[in-house]
Amino acid sequence: MTRLSESAADRIADMSRADLRVVLRRAALMLRNVSGVPLEPVTADTLDSIAAEMGIGRSELIQIVLREWLETNAYLPVRAIDEESETDGSA
């Protein structure tokens, strides 16, 4: 559905109203049926603030935090870091 929505956005001028209506209804159904993890308001606000500070979405931040927690607690193997690759930050 994501690809279909992106494709529709790229060629919106060429789509018929009926086709666009179908794509939008499918997207709305998918969003309505998504079951997220309920968060306490203070947790949600904190995540939103950190995500905004980092310039990423809340979902991406949650993925990063969860992956790092799983690695730290030995539930996932630690990812190897390529020492010779360039980075945007500094250590």
Image (cartoon, rainbow, N blue to C red):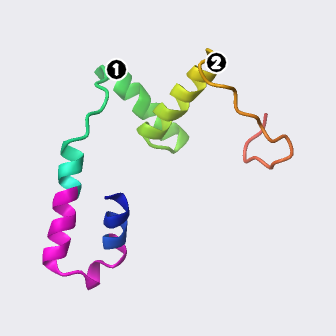
Determine the image quadrant of residue 67: top right
Secondary structure under tag 2 reads helix
- Viewer-closest of 77 and 47: 77
Q: Looking at the picture, how far across and down is residue 26, in whole percent?
A: 20, 58
Q: Is residue 21 magenta?
A: yes
Residue found 20% across the figure and 62% down from its top: 24
Q: Could you tell me residue 15's position as x and y percent?
A: 24, 81
Question: Where is 33 relative to 12, above or below?
Answer: above
Q: Up-down: is 90 above or below 70?
A: below
Residue under numbered circle 2 = 72
Residue 42, which numbered label? 1
Left or right: 73 in relation to 26: right
Of all residues shown, which one is farthest toward the top?
Answer: 73
How far apart marks 1 and 2 lie (CA) works out to 25 Å
Along the horizontal axis of the image, is 67 left or right of 57?
A: right
Mark 2: which amino acid?
A: Thr
What segment is highlighted magenta in the picture? 9-26
Q: Which residue is drawn at 28% across and 25% down?
A: 38
Q: Position of residue 27 (x, y in %)?
A: 23, 56
Which amino acid lies under the numbered mark 1 shown in the image of this protein?
A: Val
| Main secondary-structure element of the magenta-colored stretch | helix
Tell me the residue at 23%/49% (across/down): 30
Q: Of circles 1 and 2, which is in front?
A: 2
Asked whether the beta carbons under mark 1 and mark 2 sit within 8 Å of each other, the answer is no
